[in-house]
Amino acid sequence: MQEPIKAAASIALAADAGTTRAAALAFDPAKIVQKRGLIPGVKSVSGQTVPWSAAGQTRTLTLSDGSTVVESLVALEPDGYRYRISDFSGPLKYIVKEAHARFAIAPRGEGSILTWTYEFTPKGRLAAAILSFLVDSQWNGFMDAALARLKENIERP
């Protein structure tokens, strides 16, 4: 089995950990997760009829390149939540089996720090090399930009 390809980004927020966790669960991916470089953004969300708040929920994300992925909420945790991305329909379907992600929130002074991690499971050695290049050259910046937009939404009065 291939080793996961990992990515992580963190951002400090002027909001307490509870507020940050609630906002991270409630954000609209189409407003926060936008195209950057070679990585498509989220264009729309379907299949979600209630707030994103219970393990086992799934929704389909349509990306800016027309492809789709299925996002499943795996677990709610006291300090964040975990989710899985599967059923890639675009170019990533050739190199990614699935991805596991986590939002972790920790107190930091009077605010909090939000850390977003991804682990991609590649579909083989060549796929791992391509995926590693994409993560190193594109994905980390993509995550940083999304977290900056999320921060702006959380801290906006």
Image (cartoon, rainbow, N blue to C red):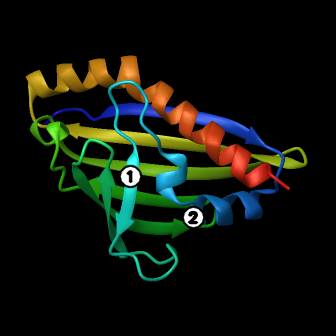
| 1 or 2: mark nearer the eye | 1
Q: Residue beneath label 1, please?
A: 43
Instruction: In this rendered view, identify the residue nearer to me: 52 or 56.
Output: 52
Q: Which residue is mark 2?
A: 25
Residue at horizontal 26 percent and vertical 41 percent from the top: 65
Check the image and report above or below for 74 versus 68.
Answer: below
Image coords of residue 59 (percent x, y): 34, 69
Picture quarter containing residue 69? bottom left
Q: Is 153 left or right of 9, judged from the image as shown?
A: right
Q: Residue furthest right?
A: 110
Q: Residue furthest bottom?
A: 50
Which amino acid is tagged 1? Lys
Disc marking residue 1 = none
**Of the residues under marks 1 and 2, which one precedes in the sequence?**
2
When asked about the image quadrant of residue 151, the answer is top right
Percent of width and height locating residue 30: 47, 54
Rendered-image quadrant of the C terminus: bottom right
Which residue occupies 82% across, 56% down?
16
- The Cα atoms of the two marked residues, 1 and 2, are separated by 18 Å
Q: Looking at the picture, how far across and down is residue 48, in whole percent?
A: 39, 76
Which quadrant holds residue 149? top right
What type is the residue that disc 2 sits on? Leu
Local secondary structure at mark 1: strand
Q: Nearer the viewer, residue 122 or 67?
A: 67
Q: Residue 10, how many percent across, how many down?
A: 62, 36
Say whether residue 23 is left or right of residue 134.
right
Residue ID at (57%, 64%): 25
Q: Considering the numbered disc 2 on the image, is that residue within a helix, a strand or a loop? A: helix
